[in-house]
Image (cartoon, grey):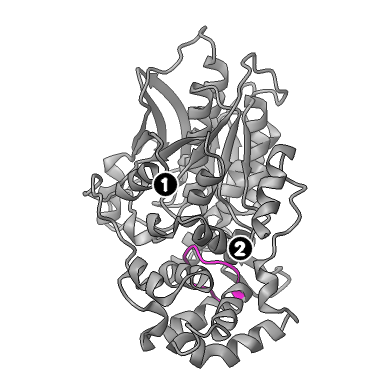
Amino acid sequence: MSEQQPSGPFIISHSSVDGPVVRLHYGFGSTQEFTEAIEFDRDLPQEGQVGFEDFSRAVRVLLLIAGVSYYKSIAPTQIEAPALNAAERALLLAMYDEGLREFAYRNNLPVPLPVDLVERPGTAPTVTVDSPTVRDGALIPVGGGKDSALVADLVPEGVLMAVNPKGAHQHLAEHLGRPLLSVQRTLDPQLRELVAAGALNGHVPVTAINSAIAVALAVLIDRRDVLMGLERSASEPSLVIPAEAGRPEIEVNHQYSKSAEAEQLLRAVFDPIGVRYLSLLRPMTELAIGRSVAQRGLASDIVSCNRAFTLWNENESSRTQRSCGDCAKCLFTALMLAPSLSPDQVRALFGRDLLDEPDHLDPVRELWSAEKPFDCVGERHESAAAVALLAELPEWKSQLIPKQLQAEAAQVLAEVGALPAQFLQIDSVEGLPPEYQQMIAGLER
């Protein structure tokens, strides 16, 4: 690390509001300060105005978790934060631990990162729901991929929003015939300079950050629900570090902030704001989601590829974004869609026959390996189930991936005594609000 890089405890300082912009302030001791900007498309409530308290509490949650982007540049042991209630403390510790385990693992740092949380004197917010505003309807954050696209299609009255929207987001909104609300998140440019100079860098729990932005927007437009497209498989770890020397095994999950555990932690801090935060797709496998996306004619209007979206993408206005066809997420998405589409349709989506390329044999095997790719890919066994399903379909069985990997996929499924068709089933919907239960349960038919 260069001498110009900061040192000292990481300080989660404060937020400020200027017209339509929220600014989040952080620092490393007295050596480095950062300011992040979150710009909404309307002036924000001021003290004394209706909605100010709820909006401020949503921004407070955002302040607590968005700091991971700066903290990771040196990952100090000590984090200084304002006084926290129990729900906030649990969320913060989870995001700076589980949310950064991939970052720590890939940078050869201790997993989990040692964190000494120090709270400044003050009064933490109460946890009672005391919002004076009666809200209704839903806000749906869309990411351009299949999961949020399905939620948006299922709830046609929901308002669509995106953080730093690009061409794929706009294309989906146009396909659905609905406007797209935009929120711009701008990282402090000093962070990019630090990374260029050799500071630590890596994956952060961005879904949690975008969720807090969405809840703040829901308050501004009086929406009761923030509906996410977070699926069952997001709870499966990417790898497990074996136990040793009295230490228990440690899970590392690329998708931690999409997991059921993270959803519950986020819900606990958002409930007092008067906004219900939940995922409609939690009872669904990725195979079941892929089937619904295909059946509802959404497949040609999604881009499920993280390489197509980067926070520092210079071409933010691009309307020609396409999946790269080479990353693990593209290959996994093709597997999830293929049992419900023809080879010609999948070729049209990706521009290639992804499941008929020799170079993709090992990458498919990696999807069910003990160390899955650090990408948004689903459960090991549902990847094997997809291959097994394709091997039984006349139009797919001659393609290289199902033809050569059929036996291996069957062996993976045999480990848990599962049949491929089981991964098209939908789990119990009882955890969803009553008004959404039949909507999801009906997708299995």
Query: Of helix, strand and loop, which one carries label 2?
Result: helix
Judge the density around disc 1: few (<14), some (14-19), many (≥20) Cα neighbours within 10 Å: many
Q: Which residue is mark 1?
A: 69
Query: Is residue 379 located in the magenta-colored stretch of the structure?
Result: yes
- Between marks 2 and 1, how big is the CA–CA gap? 33 Å
- Across and down, in percent, residue 291 comes to 56, 63
Q: Position of residue 232 (x, y in %)?
A: 64, 59
Q: Quadrant of residue 135?
A: top right
On screen, residue 125 versus residue 43, left or right, reads right
Residue 288 bears which disc, if any? 2
Frontmost residue, 161 versus 68? 161
Quarter where residue 224 is shown: top right
Q: Position of residue 269 (x, y in %)?
A: 64, 34
Is the residue 34 above or below the residue 423 in the image?
above
Q: Residue at x 66, y 77 (%)?
A: 420
Q: Between residues 257 and 389, which one lies in front from this camera angle? A: 389
Question: Does the image show residue 221?
Answer: yes
